[in-house]
Structures are given as C-alpha cells and as structure tokens.
Amino acid sequence: MIKQKFLLASLAMLLTLTACGQPQQIAPTVAAPTATVFGVPTLAAQPPIAQQTQSPTQALAASPESVCMAPAQLTPAMTEGPYYKSNTPQRASLLEANMKGIKLVVSGYVLTTDCRPVARAWLDFWQADASGQYDNAGYTLRGHQFTDEAGRYQLTTVIPGLYPGRTEHIHFKVQAPNGPVITAQLFFPDVPQNKSDGIFDAKLLLNMKDASDGKTAAFNFVVNTK
C-alpha cells in the first residue's frame, strides 16, 4: 500500500513538472499603450480622430443668428453696370487654369430681415480680372450658385483689378426663391479709389482676412422673400 502511494505521488509530481515545462497557449490580449508621466506609468494618449477642415462657410458662424440682429437692413441696391450677362454657368468657383491674381474666398449667408436663413437663394456674380478687364465674349469670372439648406454660400475667385474710373468691386445679383432681385456690388476695404468712386457704399464692404493662399472675406446678404 505504501509502495503504491509512493508510486502515485511520484507520477503526479512527474506530470506536474512536465506540464510546467510546456508553454501554455493563452489567448493574446492587446495591452493598453502606456506612457510615463513624472516617472509613473499611465495610459498613453490616443491619437486624435482626424477631423475635416471646415470650409469658410462652416467656419463663418455656428448659426445665422450669430451674424445677424433683427431687424436686419436689406442689402442696398445699385446700378447693374454695362457688362452683365445672363445664363451664366452654375459654379461656386470662378478660378480657371493659369488665372492671374490673388485668390479670394468670399462666404456668408443669405438671410431675411428677421435673420432667418434663405435656402436655395440664387446668387449671380461677375467681375473684372486682376488687370481690370471683363470677359464680354465668354463667361470668365462669371457664374451663379444657390445657397444650401442653412442659407450659406461660398464664392472662390480672384481680387479684381481696377477698372478705369472705378474702385475694386464684384457685381452680384441675389434673390430668394420667388422674391425680388437685388443688384449691387461688393467693395474692398482700404482701397484709395473708394473715396472717389461715385457709387461706393460702405454698407457693401467685404470683411477681409489674410489666408495662407490668398484672402478670405465674409458678407451676408439680406433679402425680401416676396
């Protein structure tokens, strides 16, 4: 009996030693990344999730109410000028290959006088090129677009040159769906010719800022809807 117990004990010990000598198959786990802060291990900061860069219209304001105070004044109207052409191409960017000039991105809202955004408002822009010349044969630096559901628009173009006898300006027409058309011009700050321009209106000045690849500007149009 004693001999049998001894043999059984020896066999159990042998099995235990054999098992300890074999590598155990453990399901792999991913350890949380660690970093050392003041000598104390801690969870490492995770890389931030890539975020889309906001377009100028998105960065302009969180809501129309933040750029408008009711009752807002209607955008003033002025002369159309001699170079308007209908049936312009629908496009938000007027830039073309090898176009000279300083890039300009204008963004903002089309709003009602009580600061409500106007979705699907029509905007038509036309202007001179960087040397002050209009394309009257084709549609260079001419185009129309529509606001999005939040009433936002964005125009990519170049800063126009000085047309003889005028200051720098961009022509536009804007209209809410089924509303009256407003025709006027956008102007640039700190242009000496503003003082001598016969139709310059400070209410139509762009709010300009420097950008890495040119300039950005903001302007909000206020229209009637009927």
Image (cartoon, rainbow, N blue to C red):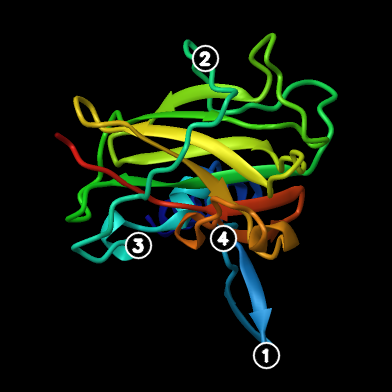
User: Looking at the image, do the residues carrying marks 3 and 1 touch, with CB atoms under 8 Å apart?
Assistant: no
Q: Is residue 125 left or right of residue 117?
A: right
Say which element carries label 1. Answer: loop
The kind of residue tagged 4 is Gln
User: Looking at the image, do the residues carrying marks 3 and 4 touch, with CB atoms under 8 Å apart?
Assistant: no
The location of residue 71, given as percent across then percent down, is 19, 62
Image quarter hosting the N terminus: bottom left
In this figure, which residue is indicated by the disc labeled 2?
Answer: 88
Q: Residues within 10 Å of mark 3 (few under 14, many from 20)?
A: some
Which residue corresponds to the image point at 48% horizontal and 32% vertical from the top-left?
80
Q: Earlier in the sequence, mark 3 or mark 1?
A: 1
Disc 1 and disc 2: Cα gap in Å?
64 Å
Image quarter hosting the C terminus: top left
The kind of residue tagged 3 is Val
The location of residue 144, given as percent across then percent down, is 48, 23
The kind of residue tagged 2 is Thr
Disc 3 and disc 1: Cα gap in Å?
46 Å
Which residue corresponds to the image point at 54% horizontal and 22% vertical from the top-left?
84
Judging depth in this view, the residue of 13 and 135 nearest the camera is 135
Q: Tell me, for residue 46, which label it has, or none.
A: 4
Which residue corresponds to the image point at 52% horizontal and 14% vertical from the top-left?
88
Residue 54 in sight from this viewpoint: no
Q: Tell me, for residue 38, which label it has, or none.
A: 1
Disc 1 and disc 4: Cα gap in Å?
19 Å
Disc 3 and disc 4: Cα gap in Å?
36 Å
